[in-house]
Image: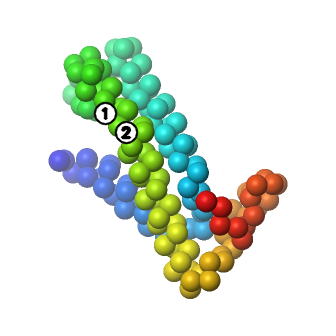
Amino acid sequence: MTAVNIETHALNAVYVILNLFVTGLPVRILHFWHSMVYAFVYVLFSLFYTLGGGTNEANKNYVYSVLDWKGSTGFTVGISIAVIFVAMPLVHCVCYGIYRLRRAICCHGDGHMIDSKEVELAYRDNPSYTADKDAS
């Protein structure tokens, strides 16, 4: 594990967790599919990148070694499916849990909290959003 790897992944995860605690951004449990679509698009990108002759900084034909489409295709497909259908929903559930914890701490157990003004303004024209509602 290199310093760049730690900075890229671990510090990013810490930033996201801290950001979920200090912002008023709501996390909706039923939006788990957004992260799944993102992961699917990234997997497609890595496939097309490899097939198009793209290389990483070490001049290898993959972005990440686990996404080596030319070297171990079966393993890469398995990892891709696991990330899309297991890891991404799990990560989203962790983010939702952090959101619920923040609400519990902020609301002192009464379950009511107004989301930030920015969030309220951004969603004011959306009929399915109410600032005081805890949509799951």
Res. 56 in view: no
Q: Amino acid at mark 1?
A: Ile
Q: Which residue is mark 1?
A: 79
Residue 41 on image: x %, y %: 49, 30
Work out which residue is located at the far top of the displayed protein and give it: 52
Residue 91 point in image, percent of width and height: 42, 52
Pointer 1 local density, CA inside 10 Å: few below 14, some 14–19, many at least 20: some
Q: Is residue 27 above or below residue 72?
A: below
User: Pointer 2: what residue?
Assistant: 83
Which residue corresponds to the image point at 38% horizontal and 26% vertical from the top-left? Answer: 46
Q: For the point 49% across and 72% down, which residue is it?
A: 101
Q: Is residue 116 above or below residue 96?
A: below
Type of amino acid under label 2: Val
Q: Determine the image quadrant of residue 85.
A: top left
Q: Quick one: which residue is furthest to the left in this view? A: 1
On screen, residue 27 above or below 117:
above
Determine the CA span between mark 2 and mark 1. 6 Å
Quick check: 104 above or below 9? Answer: below
Secondary structure state at the residue bearing disc 2: helix
**Image quarter of the C terminus:** bottom right
Q: Quadrant of residue 74 in the image?
A: top left
Question: Which residue shows up at 62% across the image and 78% down it?
Answer: 111
Q: Crowdedness of circle 2 by 10 Å Cα count: few (<14), some, many (20+)?
A: some
Q: Residue at x 75, y 64 (%)?
A: 130
Whether tag 2 and tag 1 are in contact, CB under 8 A, the answer is: yes
- Is residue 109 shown left or right of residue 93? right
Residues 80 and 86: in front is: 86
